[in-house]
Image (cartoon, rainbow, N blue to C red):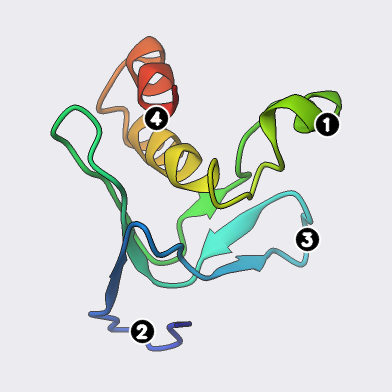
Amino acid sequence: MKCCCPDCTFLSTYPALPALTALLTDADTWTVDCHWLSQLVKGKAVVNERSFLTDGTSFPRAAWRVMGHPFSKDILPHALGHDALYAAELLTREECDQWFL
C-alpha cells in the first residue's frame, strides 16, 4: 500500500515490506512511502517513518551474488532497521551492525 497523504496514520509491519520510491536525483537512494515497523531483534523493533531515505544495503555489487540484492525481501527488513537506528544515533555503529547480522 502506498501512502500519499501528508498526515499518514497507516503503519505496515514486518513481514510485509514497505512501498519504496526511487529518488529522481539519485537512483541508489529510495524513500519509504509509508510508516513501517521492523521485525523484532533482541526484543526491539524500529519504526521507519514515511519519507525515510535508504540505500538498501551498502555492500559492493560484486557481493550481490553471495549476499543477495540490496532490496531483496530477505535483506531489506534488516537494512531498514539498521539504517533507522544508525540515522537516529540510538546505538553505536557496531550495535547497528549487529542488528543487521
Q: What label sits on residue 61 in the rendered view?
A: 1
**Which element is circle 2 on?**
loop
Q: Amino acid at mark 2?
A: Pro
Labels 3 and 2 touching (C-beta < 8 A): no
User: Mark 1 and mark 3 in contact (Cβ < 8 Å)?
Assistant: no
* Relative side of 82 to 41, left or right: right
Residue 36 lies in quadrant:
bottom left
Say whether disc 3 or disc 4 marks the residue closer to the N-terminus. Answer: 3
Q: Amino acid at mark 4?
A: Tyr
Q: Which of the two discs, 2 and 4, labels the residue nearer the N terminus?
A: 2
Work out which quarter of the rendered image holds the N terminus and state it: bottom left
Q: Which mark is residue 6?
A: 2
Residue marked by disc 4: 86
Residue 34 picture quarter: bottom left
The residue at the point 33 percent across, 34 percent down is: 85
Q: Is residue 21 above or below residue 98?
A: below
Q: How far across and down, in percent of the image, does residue 52 sit?
A: 45, 56
Please tell me whether mark 2 or mark 4 is closer to you in this view. 4
The kind of secondary structure element at disc 3 is loop
Q: Earlier in the sequence, mark 3 or mark 1?
A: 3
Above or below — where is 2 with respect to 30? below
Q: Nearer the viewer, mark 3 or mark 1?
A: 1
Q: Earlier in the sequence, mark 1 or mark 2?
A: 2
Secondary structure at numbered mark 4: helix
Q: Position of residue 16 (x, y in %)?
A: 40, 65
